[in-house]
Image (tube, grey):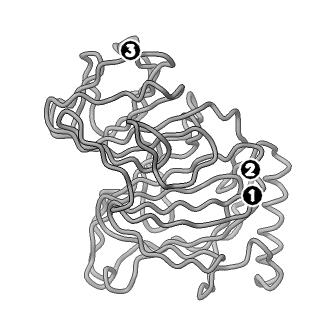
Amino acid sequence: MNDRTGLPDSVDLLIEPRSRDLGGFTVGRVLPYAKRRLVGPFIFFDVMGPSRFAPGEGVDVRPHPHIGLATVTYLFEGELRHRDNLGCDQVIRPGDVNWMTAGRGIVHSERTDDAPRAAGQRLYGIQTWVALPASDEETAPSFHHHPAADLPTIERDGATYTLIAGAAFGAVSPVRTFSPIYYAAVDADAGAPIDPVAEHVERAIYVVDGPVEIDGTRIPENTMAVLKSGASPKIRATEMSRLMLLGGANIGERKIWWNLVATDEAKINAARKRWADAAASGFEEAGDFALPPGETEHIPLPDGP
């Protein structure tokens, strides 16, 4: 479902996830999409799961580099351990936020810890990439963990909004951002109206579980509805629903290749060379692309343009 057939005037596009293998587990990729590369600064939107890992199985995303973006991890179920070459080592659990600013360059891994690997677990969550403004592409890399208790929650008309990042609903998240943005998780009762966050220019709704209606048109779960700029839709949860609201200011076009994002293709090519050279040196001369402490593996540079 990816055209405008039967859509209300307030909706520009519907996007369904496409399956992508990240090496040991599969995600549903929503953004980037051929007809919509970004929504505000959001350039990647991946749905992890729901996946059931049997005892002895888990996630092993080996160390890999990023530039020009911030990665944002938010879980509904399960847990993951983040390690990066700044020395940050953090387990993320449901409701927490991991925000990693890559800036000029960072390397990180994501793995299942020994205890949940031995027991088996169900993993379900969302990972997004937020493109940095051109003025911040070369900022120093950083990592911040925000426990669920620190995030603003807003109760309104049968819906609970958890503000992950940015500003909305009269609240501001403690997560440091670089451009006008909003990102929220919503748990809604059947019949609850949903705030479309009118103050932001570019907006989208991802229906995680339970369908909603936009101006009377049913939007099924596992679907992103990109709203038209300036539209004032009436959104209603028709059943108990879980949603993600996202968007912000238009940040302009971006080049994207593998895990690298930039305004200029030359910066991507330079980062490719840095990763290749770091690997060739055994990561002894790697600079910003050194491996996280305790890690000995890495994801090789992909072949092709």
Residue 152 position (above or below residue 279): above
Question: Which label lies toward us, 2 or 3?
Answer: 2
Residue sitting at 39 percent across and 16 percent down? 232
The residue type indicated by label 3 comes to Thr
The residue that mark 1 highlights is 139
Label 2: few (<14), some (14–19) or many (≥20) C-alpha neighbours in 10 Å: some
- Specify the label residue 5 is tagged with: 3
Circles 2 and 1, Cβ within 8 Å, touching? The answer is yes
Q: Whole-percent x and y of residue 203?
A: 47, 30
Residue sitting at 78 percent across and 61 percent down? 272
Residue 284 position (above or below residue 167): below
Q: Whole-percent x and y of residue 55?
A: 27, 80
Structural distance between the alpha carbons of marks 2 and 3: 39 Å
Left or right of 269 in this view: 7: left
Q: Secondary structure at mark 3?
A: loop
The residue type indicated by label 1 comes to Thr
Residue sitting at 37 percent across and 42 percent down? 244
